[in-house]
Image (spheres, rainbow, N blue to C red):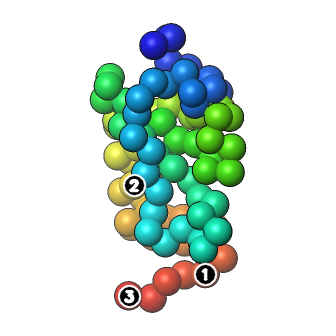
Amino acid sequence: MDQLRNGMPATLLGEVVWRKSRFSNPSGNCVELAQLPCGGVAVRNSRDPEGPALVYAHGEIDAFIRGVKNGEFDDLARVILEE
């Protein structure tokens, strides 16, 4: 695997397993994430699976997910899902 860098083609990440939210839209277009062997996480756009991937350290993803769970990005969503 090449040195990991932001914007690298997702195809260069090797045999990672990409996952998307069960809340993704019916056509399947969504943000996908993959665990990297180094412990980081890659993010790509499912509409362009061979396109660029953003690579984040575990701590960066942890902070982002905590922020999402805390509602810090609710204003960016078109529809807020009620539980």
Q: Is residue 65 visible?
A: yes
Amino acid type assigned to the residue bearing label 2 in the image: Ile
**Residue 79 bears which disc, if any?**
1
Q: Residue 47, image x and y in percent?
A: 68, 51
Say which residue label 3 marks: 83
Kindly identify which residue carries mark 2: 65
Q: Is residue 1 left or right of residue 51?
A: left
Name the side, left or right, on which 22 lies relative to 12.
left
Task: Tell me the residue at 49%/25% (across/down).
Answer: 13
Q: Position of residue 14 (x, y in %)?
A: 45, 24
Query: Which label is found at residue 8?
Result: none
Q: Describe residue 77's horizontal placement relative to residue 38 as left or right.
A: right
The answer to whether mark 1 and mark 3 are in CB contact below 8 A is no
Q: Are marks 3 and 2 in contact (CB under 8 Å)?
A: no
Q: Secondary structure at mark 2?
A: helix
Q: Position of residue 4 (x, y in %)?
A: 50, 18
- Compute the Cα span from label 3 to label 2: 18 Å
Kindly give the residue lying farthest to the top in the view shown: 2
Q: Along the polypeptide, which appears first: circle 3 or circle 2?
A: 2
Q: Is residue 32 above or below residue 29?
A: above
Query: Mark 1 to mark 3: distance in Å?
Result: 13 Å
